[in-house]
Amino acid sequence: MTDTYKTIEKPSDEVLFKEKNSKFFGYAFPVQSENEVKDILDQVKKQHYTGRHWCYAYQIGTKTKIYRANDDGEPNNSAGMPIYGQIQSFDVTNVLVIVVRYFGGVKLGVGGLVTAYRTAAQMALETVEIVEKTINTHFFIRFDYKNMNKVMRVIKEKNLNVVNQVLELDCLIEISCRLTQKEEIFNAFNHIFEVSITEKED
């Protein structure tokens, strides 16, 4: 089981690919949800309001991934899928790639369009730093204050990341660990008397 993924943290530079007077502007953006896609797309459309097509593809998620490819009026699979192919080629997720086309008066044919959209997407992804991150699981640990030392000892021993904590008579700590440690961490707390551990739902 793998517990890492690759993504980008900052938007790419704007890139430009030209083919037979048509211009293809490419962009890559980090995204966490499908709602963000619409907002970014709206911004790019405002910026390039005289463009002819605003084609895009995105992939979101780590444990399970969702993707979408949109040709925006170009011939079927001539734009969105070549863009998505570059997202797969760079092996990144939580990424949106948009390519804006200005028509230059000469038709490129489906093969020409596939090449142009793929190249603009590739150029955009090449300008941005790709980072590797870990896929984490979050747990809630509930216990009485008197058991604080037992819980904290495990957190320290296992070098766990504390995300949130409420330390009163009834204590609640949210921790995160790498996906590959999930079973080990669950068992470490599950064996402690008067301490309960539950996995946080995504």
Image (cartoon, rainbow, N blue to C red):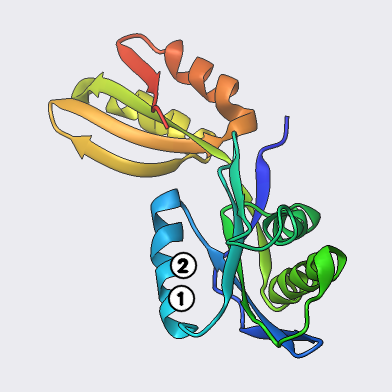
Q: Quadrant of the C terminus?
A: top left
Q: What amino acid is at disc 1? A: Lys
Residue position for label 1: 45
Mark 1 vs mark 2, CA separation in Å: 6 Å
Q: Position of residue 189 (x, y in %)?
A: 44, 19
In the picture as drawn, the residue positioned furthest to the bottom comes out as: 21
Are dots 1 and 2 in contact, CB under 8 Å?
yes
In front of the other: 125 or 77: 77
Query: Dot 2: within a 10 Å radius of its alpha carbon, few (fewer than 14), some, or many (20 or more) residues?
Result: some
Q: Position of residue 118 (x, y in %)?
A: 78, 67
The answer to whether residue 104 is left or right of residue 116 is: left
Residue position for label 2: 41
Dividing the picture into quarters, in which one does residue 191 lie?
A: top left
Q: Quadrant of the N terminus?
A: top right
Q: Position of residue 200 (x, y in %)?
A: 39, 28
Q: Position of residue 69 (x, y in %)?
A: 63, 52
Task: Name the residue rendered at 26%, 20% in the picture.
Answer: 143
In the picture as drawn, the residue positioned furthest to the right comes out as: 111
In front of the other: 201 or 127: 127
- Give the structural element (helix, strand or loop) at label 2: helix
Q: What amino acid is at disc 2? A: Leu
**Residue 164 position (above or below residue 64):** below
The answer to whether residue 18 is left or right of residue 188 is: right
Task: Name the residue rendered at 33%, 28% in the picture.
Answer: 149
**Residue 176 position (above or below residue 76):** above
The answer to whether residue 79 is left or right of residue 65 is: right
Task: Name the residue rendered at 60%, 45% in the picture.
Answer: 67
The answer to whether residue 184 is left or right of residue 47 is: right
In front of the other: 162 or 101: 101
Tell me the tag on residue 67: none
In the picture as drawn, the residue positioned furthest to the left comes out as: 169
